[in-house]
Image (cartoon, rainbow, N blue to C red):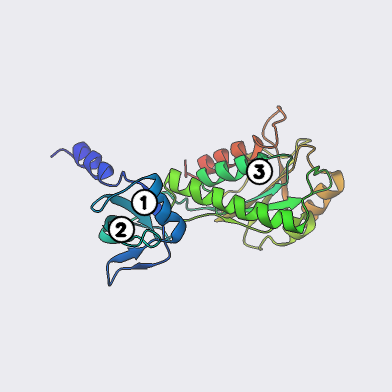
């Protein structure tokens, strides 16, 4: 068999529905799915005994599995057939700090940030944010966004699920950046190009504003804490376009795209 044919055959071997699980026991070689995924497997996908799936342990390992038991529709069992490292995770950890936009734009941003390899998404409220959910609404939104990240991780083949953090304020977001992380703030009024930055860091924090961008005093505060102002060219991007463009360029510049 030629190398190309082998690679195609190996790739096809792992083309099955994907799930994540916290209950992978390599000794018993059995994986138990949670209620929600079990219902999806039985009622939506209508999988049957003997059907195969890929189940990830959320730590960068994929397991080729075979459905072994449908007796309990709320706790379906899979038997482990094979294991391999998941190669979809980038070698740079990018946290997206996103000012809360209007309507459901944050749903789109979380989905695309997940597809592009962000490890963490932190929604924050800046001075120009129009949408200001109260604590109860923010908690519900956080849960929904985490579910979006989960589904997007399955769809794009991630080995880990990005964590959607609780809503916070701008200063707290800036102050949460660790000293070993490169903080960059996207500012339409000037700054460096991404290609001009020192991207040898293994951790990068990306700050992007809402529809109105950042107030000057917010920019000054971020800069006083070590952030570097950057821009994405002469065109002003929509707040839901900017994080997609920023993450795509960063992944490309760091060799992860």
Q: In this view, does 59 lie to the left or right of 51?
A: right
The N terminus, quarter of image: top left
Residue 101 rendering spot, x and y as whole percentages = 73, 42
Query: Mark 1, mark 3: which one is toward the viewer?
Result: 1
Is 5 above or below relative to 198?
A: above
171 or 148: nearer the viewer: 148
Q: Distance between the residues labelled 2 and 1?
A: 8 Å
Dot 2 and dot 1 residues touching (CB under 8 Å): yes
Q: Name the residue under label 2.
A: 70
| Residue 31: quadrant of the picture | bottom left
Tell which circle, 3 or 2, labels the residue nearer the N-terminal end.
2
139 or 93: nearer the viewer: 139
Q: Is residue 5 left or right of residue 241?
A: left
Give the structural element (helix, strand or loop) at label 3.
Answer: helix
| Number of dots carrying numbers | 3
33 or 132: nearer the viewer: 33
| Residue visible at 61% across and 50% down in the picture | 145
Point out the residue furthest to the left here.
1
| Residue 244: quadrant of the picture | top right
Q: Judge the density around disc 3: few (<14), some (14-19), many (≥20) Cα neighbours within 10 Å.
A: many
Residue 66 rendering spot, x and y as whole percentages = 26, 55
Q: Can residue 118 be seen by looking at this rendering? A: no
| Residue visible at 47% across and 49% down in the picture | 153
Q: Name the residue under label 1.
A: 42
């Amino acid at each position: 068999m030629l190398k190309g044919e082998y690679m195609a055959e190996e790739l096809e071997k792992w083309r099955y529905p994907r799930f994540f699980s916290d209950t992978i026991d390599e000794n018993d070689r059995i994986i138990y799915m949670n209620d929600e995924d079990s219902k999806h497997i039985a009622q939506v996908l209508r999988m049957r005994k003997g059907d195969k799936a890929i189940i990830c342990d959320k730590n960068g390992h994929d397991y080729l599995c075979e459905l072994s038991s449908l007796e309990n529709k709320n706790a379906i069992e899979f038997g482990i057939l094979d294991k391999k490292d998941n190669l979809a995770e980038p070698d740079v950890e990018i946290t997206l700090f996103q000012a809360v936009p209007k309507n459901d734009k944050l749903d789109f941003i979380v989905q695309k940030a997940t597809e592009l390899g962000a490890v963490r998404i932190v929604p924050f409220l800046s001075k120009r944010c129009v949408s200001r959910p109260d604590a109860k609404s923010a908690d519900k939104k956080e849960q929904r966004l985490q579910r979006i990240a989960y589904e997007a991780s399955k769809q794009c083949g991630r080995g880990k699920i990005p964590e959607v953090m609780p809503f916070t304020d701008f200063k707290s977001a800036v102050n949460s950046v660790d000293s070993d992380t490169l903080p960059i703030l996207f500012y339409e009024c000037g700054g460096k190009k991404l290609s001009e930055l020192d991207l040898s860091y293994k951790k990068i924090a990306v700050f992007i504003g809402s529809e109105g961008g950042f107030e000057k005093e917010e920019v000054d505060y971020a800069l006083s804490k070590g952030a570097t102002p950057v821009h994405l060219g002469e065109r002003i991007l929509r707040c839901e376009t900017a994080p997609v463009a920023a993450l795509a360029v960063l992944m490309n510049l760091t060799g992860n795209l």
